[in-house]
Structures are given as C-alpha cells and as structure tokens.
Amino acid sequence: MDIVLIGGLWLNGSVWGRVVSELERLGHRPVPLTLPGQGDGSASATLDEQVAAVLAAVDAAPGGPMVVGHSAACTLAWLAADRRPERMAKVALIGGFPYGDGHRYADVFEVRDGAVPFPGWGPFEGPDAADLDDEARRELAAAAIPVPEGVARGVVRLADERRFDVPVVVVCPEFTPAQAQEWIKAGDVPELAPAKQIDFADIDSGHWPMVTQPEELARILSSAANTA
C-alpha cells in the first residue's frame, strides 16, 4: 500500500528517512512529502497549496493510500480525508489531532518576517523532547525550515461529512491511548468524536518518533496499513 507521510511544522520529507527504509522492507511504498514552503524554496506558500500537494500524492497513489500526518500536519491529513474520502484507505495521526472548520492551521508561534521560525527547544521541554539527545536536537534545529505565515495562519475548511467514514489510527507518543480516548470523549477533539472507526497505538517516544523510534513507528504504520 502507498503510505503518504506528512511531517509537522519545520520539517521536510527527509525527516522520514529511516521510517521509509523500514516501510519498504515491510512491503509498502512510502511517499514522504516535502510541502510547499517547507523545503521547496518557496517562502510565500499557503495552506491551500500544502493541501493541494497532499491531494496530488493521494490522487497519484494506485488504490487507496493511507495518509499519515504528524503533529500540526494531522490537520493536513484530515483535510485530505475531507477532500478525498472515497480515495482514502485510512488516516494515521501521530502526536496530534485535527483542527475543525474555521480554525487557523497553526497560529501558535510568533511570526517573524512573514514566517514562523523554529522557536528553540524551550516550548518542548518535558515529555515532547525528553528522548532526544543533544545530537538529535542539534540536527532537528539546524534542519528546521521556517513555516510561511500563509500556512501557519491559513484557515481550515472542512465540508464533507464522509470524512468521518475514513478509518483513523491515533499514534500516541508523548501521551497515552487512554489520555487520547479521554480527550475525545470529553469533547476536546470534536473532529474525531463522530469518526466511525478509531484505533489507538502506543509508542514509547517523545513528539518526534520518526527520529527516535523509526523502526517501531514503521511497524505501527505497517500494521495500520495492513488492516485498512
């Protein structure tokens, strides 16, 4: 099965390198995306352009792909489900949850000179970054690509309720499956409450399991794809 991989803020497709190798070994065709404005040289990309890039990968996949969103890109994966519910085999959400209609995509960090630079490790101290050693932190920070303002402050638009028919797996790194289930039950994740099928997978890692636990993450994604 094709598995479309979308990294979160500041990341390009190369962050999936070791996950890609393992998924290929497990018999899948991984498609790591470098999004407009996050590695293609464009500083003026918009959220709509990123959505279009994801949809192009979905449309190019033979059969129905599984689309994987990490962190903020959980919303991108969900937008793909909204636009192509009939084409999607499954959505996998790693370390995050999708925003609903009308919400800004990632209006969390400071915009400087038209983009959102990586803010340093301060906001991520604790469970998010506890398993990153000094070398991994340096490499991630050095490779971080400022996110264009048009992406970060783009408005999420969802319209097709058939997205709730697409099976979902929530991969839980810095939080537990029990916590995720409680958040959904409590109404904190309104986009997933109506979903008809949600599974949960635990992984012993911080917020970037593709860096610290790539083989285990690939195994989880392979298992999710095989049951799509």
Image (cartoon, rainbow, N blue to C red):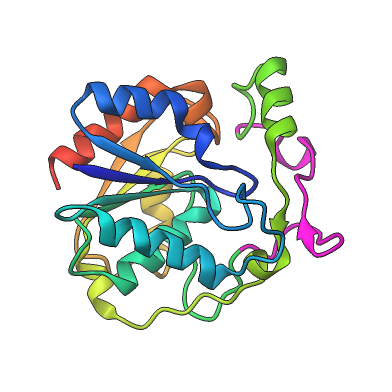
Is the N terminus in the top left, top right, bottom left or bottom right quadrant?
top left
Indicate whether 92 appears above or below 195: above
Q: In this rendering, would 218 be left or right of 37?
A: left
Q: Along the line of sight, which residue is nearer the eye, 6 or 106?
A: 6
Residue 150 forms part of the magenta stretch: no
Q: Can you name the residue that lies furthest to the front here?
A: 41
Q: Which residues are magenta?
A: 106-127
Q: How far across and how far down the image is residue 199, in percent?
A: 25, 47
Q: In this rendering, would 142 be left or right of 160?
A: right
Residue 123 forms part of the magenta stretch: yes
Q: How far across and how far down the image is residue 22, in percent?
A: 32, 22
Which residue is found at the position 78% from the left and 50% from the top? 117
Residue 167 in view: yes
Which residue is found at the position 41% from the left and 78% from the top? 158
Q: In this rendering, would 74 be left or right of 57?
A: right
Q: Choose top left, top right, bottom left or bottom right for residue 213.
A: top left
Q: How many marks?
A: 0
Q: In this rendering, would 225 be left or right of 55?
A: left
Indicate whether 29 appears above or below 24: below
Indicate whether 25 appears above or below 60: above
Residue 185 in view: no
Q: How far across and how far down the image is residue 17, in percent?
A: 46, 27
Which residue is found at the position 22% from the left and 34% from the top? 28
User: Most prominent secondary structure in the magenta stretch?
Assistant: loop
Which residue is found at the position 53% from the left and 53% from the top? 35
